[in-house]
Image (cartoon, rainbow, N blue to C red):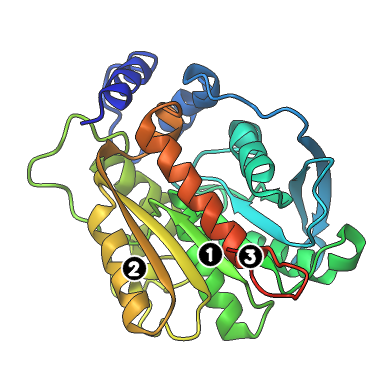
Amino acid sequence: MNLQVLISALRLSRSRPLERLPVGDWQGRRVAADSINVEDLAGMPKPDGVRAVPINMIGTAGRRIPARIYRTPSASDRACIVYVHGGGMIMGSLDGYDRRCSTYAAQTGVPVIAVDYRLAPEHPYPAAVDDVTDAVTWVASHAEEFGIDPDRIAIAGDSAGGGIAAGVTLRLRDEGGPRLACQVLVYPMLDDRTPAPVRPSRMLTWTAEDNATGWGCLLGEAAGGPDVPAYAAPARATDLHGLPAAFIEGCTLDLFMAEDEAYAHRLAQAGVEVVWRVRKGVPHGYDVIAPASWIARRAWRERFEFLRQHLLVDASGRGAA
């Protein structure tokens, strides 16, 4: 395992309650997550010169969707990244992802719009997917106002946010919504049927108990059964044709590794352009736990390159490498 990641993961574990929370205790998990700021603890730097401005989006039936746009003063390109934060469907916030979204904006030169979707169990499926679908649609319909080309909108997310992003991408295709330029799914949470590992690793930063809690809060008694829709758990999708180019990464010390790899391969089999990256010897969240590690720096660089390739254009209107 990467030594920097190991040391940082141990440091993070000491900052959290030592006892294992039982399945279903979403309140305890949310309190534990809210008690620390992982970006602060890990010393993740915030880029200079990125300005964050609140946006009040209006979704279906007049529902307000809080969001922020991150932009550098030099950003002149008309592309946009809609970012969906992680948190196991039950946690997470705009504040907790402030530095990550700032980093995407600074390193790609593309404005980032972060969406604060509703959390389970107070708001079970389809609330989060509804909110992010509405957010993408709102961004496309207000593109001129923000100087955005509606044909150059990407969606990105990590963990639960990656799963929601994948579900929204499927739904937009099926419902004839805005066509996304690409999708970036970082160790995404895709399958409510994920089994507990036979030999659980002590380095799992998201455990089988956490996973059962998150999916149970999102789906209730339907979790793991035959009637879960693909927009909630994209691993269940039977038709992956016609989706935008995808960058997907999985970690070998992550509960989601098998489902992420399977989804990437199925996308490729359906004719979708896929970049699949395996991060060896690191757990879920390694890139934020140890942002200065070589493996995290490489991962961030590869994500930025993929986004620039699919969003930026040169003077001839062709995608920039």
Q: Return the residue nearer the eye: 179 or 125.
A: 179
Task: Please identify the quarter of the rendering in which residue 175 is found.
Answer: bottom right
Q: Which residue is located at x 44 percent, y 36 percent?
A: 297
Measured from the top left, where is residue 237 in percent x and y? 38, 77
Tag 3 secondary structure:
loop
Q: Secondary structure at mark 1?
A: strand
Give the number of the mark in front: 1 or 3: 3
- The residues tagged by marks 2 and 3 sit, at their Cα atoms, a distance apart of 24 Å
Give the left or right position of residue 166, taking residue 154 as reference: left
Q: Which residue is mark 3?
A: 320
Residue at 29%, 37% in the rendered image:
283
Seen from the viewer's position, the closer of residues 184 and 62 is 184
Q: Which residue is most to the right? A: 145
The C terminus lies in which quarter of the figure? bottom right
Residue 52 coordinates in the image, percent (x, y): 78, 37
* Residue mark closest to the camera, 2 vs 3: 3
In the rendered view of the protein, which quadrant contains the N terminus?
Answer: top left
Q: Residues within 10 Å of mark 2 (few under 14, many from 20)?
A: many
Identify the residue under disc 1. 183
Q: Which residue is mark 2?
A: 264
**Amino acid type of the residue that numbered disc 1 sits on in the rendered structure:** Gln
Q: Earlier in the sequence, mark 1 or mark 2?
A: 1
Please indicate whether residue 39 sits to the left or right of residue 144 in the image. left
Alpha-carbon neighbours of circle 3 within 10 Å: few (<14), some, or many (≥20)?
some
